[in-house]
Image: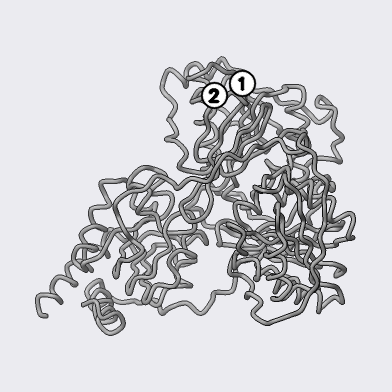
Amino acid sequence: MKIAVCVKQVPDSDATLSVNAEQTWIEEAGINFEINEYDRYALEEALKLKDAHGAEVLAVSIGPDRVGQALKTCLATGADRAVHLKDAAFSGGDPWSNATALAAALRPENPDLILCGLQADDDNLAQTPVILAEMLGVPHATGAMKIDRSDAGLRVERELEGDRREVVDLPLPALITVQTGINEPRYASIKGIMAAKKKEIATPAPSDLGVEPSAVGRAGAKITFSGLSHPEKKEGGEILSGSLEEITAELVKRIRENTGVL
Amino acid sequence: MAGRILAVVETEGGRVRESAYELVGLARSMAEAGGGTACAAVLGADPAAAAREVASRGADTVFAVKDPLLTHVTADGAVAALKALVSAQEIGVVLFSHSPMGWDVAPRLAAAHGLPALTEVVGVEGAGKTWTRMMFNGKLQVKMELAGSPLVATVQKGAFPAFEGQTAGAVEEFAPGLSAAQVRQRFVEVVAAPKGKVDLASAEVIVSGGRSLGSAEKFGIIQELADALGGQVGASRPVTDAGWLPHEHQVGSSGVTVKPKLYIAAGISGAIQHIVGMKQSGYIIAINRDKEAPIFEVADVGVVGDLFELVPALTKAVKEAKGKG
């Protein structure tokens, strides 16, 4: 079985964000990047399937040099190979052009299963994997909280609202997006980090994948983003200031006046 | 834009989910702004009754999309059926809720037409020319434009008001003629998620902690404040995902929706998934070190600062206040 895991590197969740001059994306300088939380769970799910049934795990990502670090982490954690789409033509894409790039990278690999995070913590668009499934012509399921092998292929429990789950069977090959909390992602071991040094990170250009540079990255994007900005604050509550004693005294007073709890 | 705007109605046990009327309301306002028609689609093996209900509450035309293979809605089944409907009825815009069904079906329906979708939108201008959504978990907003048809969008729940009036729309049956080979996912069943013992839904006081706590051990300060107030401990999703607390403590769209008299959020930035689960609380206090955190927008009162300092100090002050009775 061959499993491909698509990972994205995103700003860390505590990063202070500023907007670029075109108001289309954030200013990336000075920000720490980390593997998208959802994708760590997707990788772990691939590694669990590998542990239980044997599999080759391939990690794929799009982005500049910094993304190499994310892929090294995937390799050190247990992925076998990586593909880094780092040619400048791949950068600045939208879900359509990023799915186009991933499809071009994965078609020759012919994976039995593609695992992705449900969404990325930067754009929160939650659609690149599903578009990728359509481009590759494979069935998909989103928001998995449990994945098991079954006679038909895979049995997936999708998270629904209201603490319920929908159980569906999927034939292989297929693409599944996972929810956070589906498993407990492992960390890289020292042995894993050493072993990763010998593992391959391929860096194909668009021409190597048989895709036009104009179909990927910024050139291939279909959604036009503009006006990225900090939202006008809604009329939120008052922000208290003062010494620690003054603040806690004021909070106690308000709890008493407004809730009847004290 | 304008033309025919289609709201894809979700049903549950044959009943229309309330979020459908937010889509219908949006379809109507877009139709009015652009000179189009507000349509809706109800998918099922026998969708007629639900379709009539939607026709009486906002939609000019409701398509009862009827096929035995839609007894349970799967991604493949819904995409094939809606693709046939969009083509036969010249639909220009398709609206879904940003829900487990929406994110399963909408991007694939869009992609089947050679387009991406616009997801989790919270605003629409110019009858569908420009759409607004949030990014970076609510910290930034952005505008989007997309050329092509049909334009497929998922709509954040609660972002648009539900249509409340009475209308006399028409119901048209539509048979998409699905074949079993088109539907690769096989629905098995719907089950309850594994459950625990904590009952946040009926708690009068909830003190919730977020990722900033850093570890399971550090939740002690949250528990102590909850104890002092006679309340329960809640958490944001990263906390339960990390296993610091069991899932039953999770407040939000994928956990419990709560409505206590007092809700204290400590170290929770306020992702929309959390906010929808607690914004109806009677009184909300937010403590966060990031003054830009969206949680402050729903809070009645906020404190910008270090929760490891503030929470224990508040616990002490609460205990003293109770002592004085």
Q: Dividing the image into 4 quarters, which one contains the C terminus of chain A?
A: bottom left
Circle 1 Cα neighbour tier, 10 Å, few/some/many (<14 / 14–19 / ≥20): many
Q: Is residue B82 above or below residue B37?
A: above
Picture coordinates of residue B181, whole percent (x, y): 77, 34
Q: Nearer the viewer, residue B82 or B178?
A: B178
Q: To which quarter of the image does residue A260 belong?
A: bottom left
Q: Residue at x 37, y 53 (%)?
A: B212
Picture coordinates of residue A38, whole percent (x, y): 53, 42
Q: Report in which chain the residue with disc 1 lies.
A: A
Question: In this image, B240 relative to A114: left or right?
Answer: left
Circle 2 Cα neighbour tier, 10 Å, few/some/many (<14 / 14–19 / ≥20): many
Which numbered tag is attached to residue A75?
Answer: 2
Picture coordinates of residue B129, whole percent (x, y): 81, 67
Q: Which residue is mark 1?
A: A81
Q: Dividing the image into 4 quarters, which one contains the N terminus of chain A?
A: top right
Q: Nearer the viewer, residue B22 or A18?
A: B22
Q: Marks 1 and 2, how far apart in space?
A: 7 Å
Mark 1 and mark 2 in contact? Answer it, CB < 8 Å. yes
Amino acid type for the residue under numbered disc 1: Arg
Q: Residue at x 45, y 70 (%)?
A: B279
Q: How many marks?
A: 2
